[in-house]
Image (tube, helix red, strand yellow):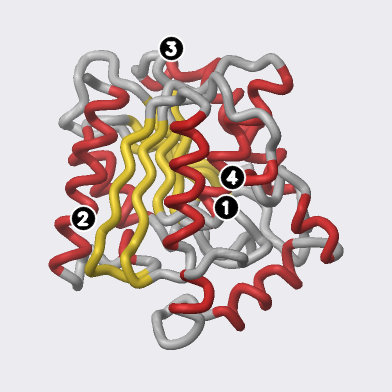
Amino acid sequence: MRARIYRPKTASAKPGVLVFFHGGGFVCGSIDSHEEAVKVLAHESGVVVCSVDYRLGPEHMFPAAVEDAVTAYAWMREHAGEHGADPARVGVGGDSAGGNLSAVACHLCKQRGLPQPAHQLLIYPAIDWSRSCESHKTFAKGFFLEDQRTHWFEDRYLNRVEERDDPRASPMKFSDFSSLAPATIVTAGFDILRDEGAKYAAMLERAGNQVDFCVETSLIHGFFNMGGVVALARSANARIAARLHRALVG
């Protein structure tokens, strides 16, 4: 598994680390597709970012990406010091599919007796394959990520339709939400995934977890990668970086 580590010049003597999982529907994307956005996130947050090239479908179907996410987090816990970072402040995060993997990693760490991440940063996360939230109907077509595309991703990630209900695929299906990492959840106002992100934030909060939830009301899915050309996306990414700084630097 390849990873690319960014240590910003703005980092303190021993900053926290974010293990980052890129979006792309578990099928597309890479550490290259997200390089510019991740560079900006590292620089503006002052946090070391480890961007992970986890396995993708259809060559590597579910749950390959999930296992890679947990493995990458555990590896960084052991090696953070070698990169000038604080092993006690290792978080997980990502956009879309990467938000899914980050959320699932927190649950699996708890189940497997691994230390809970210091933080989870979920940027318009894909949380529930059932597509039951209202935003899936409202924004099914014409807002960048369309319903038809989500089915295309599903066919290349899940082995069979029954896996939609596996909590490792749809973390909303986990039965126990207690004692999970503090969360920053950011959704987009015109996004098919908007409502499931909000619902997941509420589930975490009801279970007693610390949650910082925000809706970037004017933006669409994928804005994290649009900062170079869309001023509103650039501003939203700056706010995400500020939140990450508070979470992993203080």
Q: CA distance from mark 1 to mark 3?
A: 27 Å
Q: Which residue is mark 3?
A: 88
Dots 1, 2 in contact, CB < 8 A: no
Going by the numbered disc 1, the residue's amino acid type is Ile
Residue on which disc 1 sits: 127
Label drawn at residue 101: 4
Q: Is residue 160 above or below residue 92?
A: below
| Amino acid tagged 4 | Leu
Q: Which amino acid does the dot numbered 2 rest on?
A: Ala
Give the quarter of the figure containing the C terminus. top left
Crowd tier of the residue under label 4, counting other residues whose Cα lies within 10 Å: few below 14, some 14–19, many 20 or above: many
Total numbered circles: 4
Residue type marked 3: Ala
In the rendered image, residue 47, in percent from the top left (x then y), is placed at: 29, 30
Residue occupying the point 38% across, 66% down: 222
Query: Where is the N terminus found, in terms of image quarters?
Result: top right
Indicate which disc residue 107 carries.
none
According to the picture, the residue beneath numbered tag 2 turns out to be 236
Contact? badges 2 and 3 (CB < 8 Å): no
- Horizontal and vertical percent for residue 89? 40, 18
Mark toward the viewer: 2 or 3: 2
Q: Residue at x 67, y 40 (%)?
A: 68
